[in-house]
Image (tube, rainbow, N blue to C red):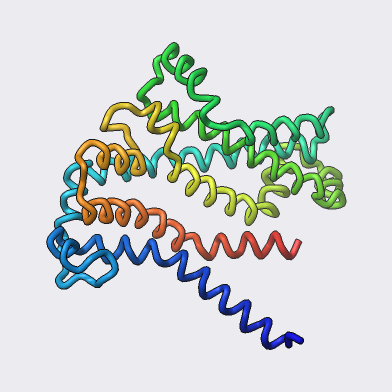
Amino acid sequence: MVTKRGVDWLLLALVIVGALLVIAPFYLVLVNSFKSPTDYATSGPLALPQALDFTGITAFWERVNFPQKVWNSVFISGIVAVLAVLISMLNAFAIGIGRVRGRTWIVLLFLLANLLPQEALLYPLYYMFKSVGLYDNVWSVIIVFTVVQAAFGTYLLSSVYGTFPKEVLEAASLDGAGRWKILWRVVFPISRPTLSVLLIFFFIWTWNEFLIPLTFLASNANQTVPVAISVLQGDRLMDVTTTSASALLGIIPTLIFFLIFQRTLTRGITAGAVK
């Protein structure tokens, strides 16, 4: 008969194995980013570098104009995150608290919008942006991702706002607060932790998007970090060390963003769990 202590050890072993599987790719990227091609050829991908070599990082940085690509990704992801959260909050307030007619069907439509594959959207969006002159413009990607992320945010927040305490709303209404004031003075402060979590996820999800930016941002000056990494790998036939360096530089900005907002994310998830 398996004891509770034995089960705990088994779970711990599984967690350790899972952690190693997650860490292994990051280890390979990190150690190979600081190797020279000669060092990689002689020692292989698993060994530590014999001496720190920044040739791969320098080559990638100069080839793709990495600061410009980072700015493009930060600008697109930041604008999308803010607009998507704002639109999600307004939509969810109308659906979850305003109790518009056909609420269930409207929420279902927002759910279905999240189930559409991006491949199905490419041609109609390409034709539309070509017609209005937004092709190869960062605002085309911003518009698409704002709508996509806001659809998910509306679906999530509608459920949250649907369970909002009616007593709080009624008390604010009796004090003479209108709907706009209730939204910004009552609903927004209480739901701020949830909105913060959405903002962080929207930023990271948009940063990591590849297919739509690849399709609608044709010029080199407008490309995002994931697109620049992919295009350069296909165009220049980079060696393994430069490829690893490109992956490392692509990870660092999102890692920094996550570390900065880690406490906000933890507070938001904890607040949601307590409620």
For the N terminus, the image quarter is bottom right
**Residue 119's spot in the image, x, y percent?**
51, 28
Vertical placement of residue 205 versus 221, above or below:
below
Q: Nearer the viewer, residue 6 or 55?
A: 6
Q: How many badges with numbers are in the image? A: 0
Instruction: Please state if 9 lies on the left or on the right of 36 as rendered.
Output: right
* Quadrant that contains the C terminus: bottom right
- From the viewer's perspective, is residue 11 above or below residue 174? below
From this view, report whether residue 134 is shown above or below residue 115.
above
Determine the residue located farthest toward the left in the rendered image: 38
In this rendered view, identify the residue nearer to me: 211 or 180.
Answer: 211
| Residue 5 picture location, percent across and down | 68, 88
Estimate the x, y position of residue 35 in percent, counting from the top left: 19, 63
In percent of the image, x 55 and y 61: which residue is there? 264
43 is higher (above) or lower (below) than 252: below
**Side of 245 where 84 appears, left or right:** right
**Identity of the residue drawn at 27% across and 38% down:** 234
Q: Quadrant of residue 106?
A: top right
Q: Position of residue 242 (x, y in %)?
A: 22, 52
Horizontal side of 144 relative to 47 (left or right) equals: right
Residue sitting at 25 percent across and 62 percent down?
32
Residue drawn at point x = 46 percent, y = 32 percent: 142
Q: Which residue extends farthest front?
A: 1
Give the farthest residue toward the top: 131
